[in-house]
Amino acid sequence: MRIGVLGAGQLGRMLALAGYPLAKTFVFYDMSGSPSAGLGEVIIDREGQYQDDFLSRVDRVTYEFEHLPVEVAEKLAKEKPVHPCPRALQVCQNRELEKTLFGQLGIPTPAWKIADSAESLKAAAEELGCPVVAKSNTEGYDGKGQAVLRSPDDAEQAWADIGHPRLIVEKFVEFTREVSIIAVRAEDGDVAFYPMAENTHHEGILRYSIAPAPKLDKAVQESAERYIRALLNELDYVGVLTLELFETEDGLVANEMAPRVHNSGHWTIEGAVTSQFENHIRAVSGHHLGSVEARGLSCMINIIGEHGDIDRILELPYAKVHLYNKGERAGRKLGHVNILADSYEELVWRVRNCAQFLPGSPAFKSSLTPKG
Amino acid sequence: MRIGVLGAGQLGRMLALAGYPLAKTFVFYDMSGSPSAGLGEVIIDREGQYQDDFLSRVDRVTYEFEHLPVEVAEKLAKEKPVHPCPRALQVCQNRELEKTLFGQLGIPTPAWKIADSAESLKAAAEELGCPVVAKSNTEGYDGKGQAVLRSPDDAEQAWADIGHPRLIVEKFVEFTREVSIIAVRAEDGDVAFYPMAENTHHEGILRYSIAPAPKLDKAVQESAERYIRALLNELDYVGVLTLELFETEDGLVANEMAPRVHNSGHWTIEGAVTSQFENHIRAVSGHHLGSVEARGLSCMINIIGEHGDIDRILELPYAKVHLYNKGERAGRKLGHVNILADSYEELVWRVRNCAQFLPGSPAFKSSLTPKG
């Protein structure tokens, strides 16, 4: 089976690496002009002229990147099965739609308002009570297009900084930690949930994911599963879906969803029986889902901006290196390292030992480390 | 780093799948005209005209197939590092050279003689004492070019059947089981040994490999490590080397070696911290070796001739499917399934459950199953 992937970055690369052993082949459709998947055929189409060519070479279509025109996905879906459905794309591209859907499905979110001017931003900040986070309603990802307002007086500056005509303003959530759940739904409606991950961000970019999340209440995992199941079923979703959440003293609060394999699921490559990438390919291809059971404990460390001393990391017997073969650039995701262990104590020690060879990495902090 | 692979079959495919995450790229050099790697660039060169082109595109050269002219490897080695060294190829292509080297290094082999006529074959059978196995001295693999002589009178027929001008005649070994050891040697001389596998052949083709081999005496693993270490050091070998052995009541007896990743090591993809493929790429690229520690118990089942019911196998939560995307043909290796378990009892049950969906598979027999 020939899988067409919209987008051609590292997620597409890892989908292909997981899909070849299932006898899939891959064609990437890239609109950015800078594909980095590094394997499989790539059709570069900045002008949107080669969609028919792409379609003629694939049996199913999926994506690794949600910031592409919904119309493109819809047009393709008229000719070939596109998983997940274009509606999932649409929801993820628009925070207002997304938060509205969360609310309809009973998934808790921070209190939020829409602002379409500096004045309405200020009013929203006043009504919600600061601090608030203002985010461009569309086109934002990896912490871009966001600002924190400590006081309503920050509104004018924030409005100018973000520079977007429509913002979503969210009340700041007092969270104990950031977590995510990754689930996969098959064509026949079967659903599987990976154990949740605990995520640490730094400057808006994911740095560490520990899975299964330490000290996670069973009831919390179950709540997250209920929420993401509601989304999967509502969207008649096929493939991997990710839901990022805040864990608070009052339970989980949803942050956002991603209609694709996700950085906080990279630990599954060695840390689960079936990786998120393989399960996405299985779902998109119409196969049965694979086991999502964890194999020991994992921590994923992102390699950001510079590669550091990869040769030293290759000496660590518990480190699995995954490079994307991209050039160094500040803030760029260049690869990740999965650290394996049998106890959380061992995991912390190993993560710190590895992180010393990644100069861009912030000090490792998690629910496993003392607060400081 | 660009790795050039001589040969373009499923072993090359799996080398590439393991090498991409280490930021390697792959160019395959195929002399057969029917490459099946299915990813990476392939140079098809039946006439041997494009070696310079191949060399200009790679930094290091390795192989996935040992039946290629030694002169080709030697010529390439004048321009670029070729690992393992062409001498390893040469030894593996000539059973007489191989057995002689084993003898020099103190590695036990079956008693053997050379025959270059039906008469000398008969004489060899008489001197060694039947049964004996006659094998073409060169060009034989996967059980091809072999005959068993139950009596010296079978010599004429065997000579005609094999049709090769020079045979090696080996005394039949009374073995309790077939085993193999896979080791890897780095450029700096560091060596690592995988736990040994127990192998079951059927009609000359490997069908099942269980690893770590059940009920294996520690002393037996150590003997095998001593033998393969002697080979690695003698050949100043870089990369993965495989040694197939018979386990007998008097200890191990070497059968043959393969200068490459090996079918009896496919279990390492999920069954070891670092797969044989990744470790070969690490060694060939000049990196440190990865951990060869087992992750639980594994059994590899080859998919031979026909694919069977892959969709049913994908439903088994403990089965990892690896397809080579090749067409069906009697006796052809089309893929393999790695079965994972935490106990041998569970492993046997799971292997049998999986094998029922592979119609070409012989009944599972191993040291774990009652003799019958």
Image (cartoon, coloured by chain):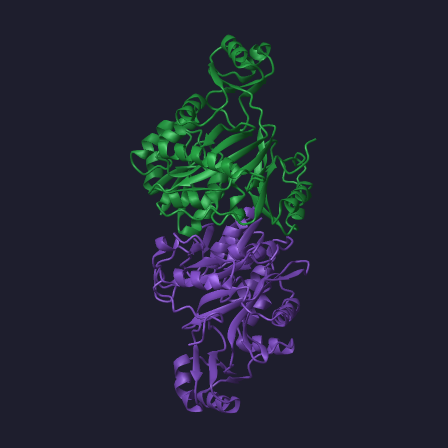
Chain colours: A green, B purple
Vertical position of residue A190 compared to residue B180: above or below: above
* Residue A235 at least partly seen: no
Q: Does A175 sit above or below residue A310?
A: above
Q: Name the image quarter holding residue A5.
A: top left
Front in this rendered view, residue A248 or B110: A248
B225 or B345, nearer to the observer: B345
- Count the marks: 0
What x and y, as percent, mark residue A137? Answer: 46, 20
Lateral position of residue A188 relative to residue B319, left or right: left
Q: Give the x, y percent position of residue A171.
A: 53, 19
Q: Is residue B151 left or right of residue A267?
A: left
- Residue for point 43% across, 35% down: A226
Q: Most extreme residue toward the top, as rendered?
A: A119
Q: Residue at x 54, y 21 (%)?
A: A146
Quarter residue B217 falls in: bottom right
Up the image or down, B284 lies above or below A297; here it is below
Considering every residue shown, the one lying at the far left of the view is A78
Work out which quarter of the rendered image holds the C terminus of chain B and state it: bottom left
Q: Is residue B341 visible in this depiction of the protein?
A: yes
Q: Position of residue B272 (x, y in %)?
A: 56, 56
Q: Position of residue A372 (x, y in %)?
A: 70, 31
